[in-house]
Amino acid sequence: MNTTLPFTPLRIDSGEHSSVIIGTLGEICKLRDNTKVEDFVKPFPAQITSGVVLENRWVGTWVDHELKHARMAALSLDSEWQNGIGREAIRKGIKQSLDFDPNGAIWSQSLDSEPMALSKVNSGFCFSILGRGIYHMDADSNEIWRVPIPDELTFNRLISINESDGQLNLFYDNGSVIILDKEDGSVIENHKISINNKIEKVFHHQNKFLIAMATGGFSILEGFNSTPSTYRTPGPIFDAKFLDSGWIWTGWRHDGQENNGKIKISRRRDIGVAILNERILSNDGKWSDFLE
């Protein structure tokens, strides 16, 4: 993982054995055994807004806000990925009511609104569509269940869906948390986290949560009946992982770590966008060691 990427990375969708690097302009490339970087391709001409690695496939969403076109599809992790059509074909296709799939898709479907909080659940995935509902699908895009969005959260942005103890924890940008039964989507309980900023990202490990704020800073929550501890950072956090010693993260020109409430910040010249095997991928496409 020492090769500089030939595109600007946005994030990494991580899996147990394979991960997928996502570029700012719709580029994707696989990491085999999370070490060997394959060539990048653009299977569909739109920004990739979310993605999740399942056992043998990657499921992603492409959104072109100007053309008001959204699509979800799955690509096999075991086959070679190929470039797809150009954006002009999509523009013409919309006028002619034609449908186009990402090149090599196992399955593909058009969406009438942008999905939020795409997350792995069991061997399938969950996501929400604003104003419509919360969906649990299997790896082949068959619906397992769907439930309505609570009325009081209809117009709030769902940030994260994560799984612990057989439950799904849904974090909204205003600090609301809805806990659903994983088997049927029924509501188990509601919580409200005491925060003074909009939530941008939520990272979790079992029942521990690092909640990153939109303008920088974060809170650590250990259980929904506890009071979160809040800390400042030099800028927004873009990725975080939990290790035996506590949380580590990377973000806007800094890396950081937390251990029993003690925070250490290390300045970096670039912008860290992802952590993989305790190495940092920055927005210039380069890999570096975590700055302790």
Image (cartoon, grey):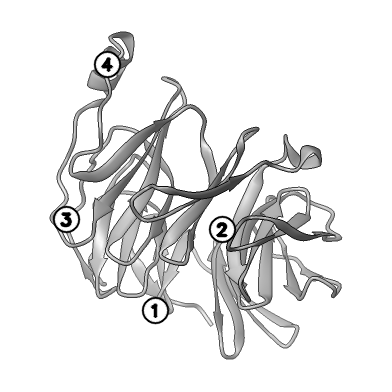
* Residue that label 3 marks: 39
Give the mark, 2 or 3, whose residue is nearer the N terminus: 3
Residue 154 located left or right of residue 61: right
Mark 2 vs mark 1, CA separation in Å: 20 Å
Residue 162 located left or right of residue 38: right
Residue 59 located left or right of residue 261: left
* Residue that label 2 marks: 252
Amino acid marked by disc 3: Asp
* Residue that label 4 marks: 93
* Residue that label 1 marks: 277
Q: Secondary structure at mark 2?
A: loop
The answer to the question of whether label 2 and label 1 lie on touching residues, with beta carbons closer than 8 A, is no
**Would you identify the image quadrant in which residue 154 lies?**
top right
Amino acid marked by disc 4: Gly
Mark 4 vs mark 2, CA separation in Å: 39 Å
Q: Residue at x 23, y 20 (%)?
A: 89
Q: Residue at x 32, y 67 (%)?
A: 55
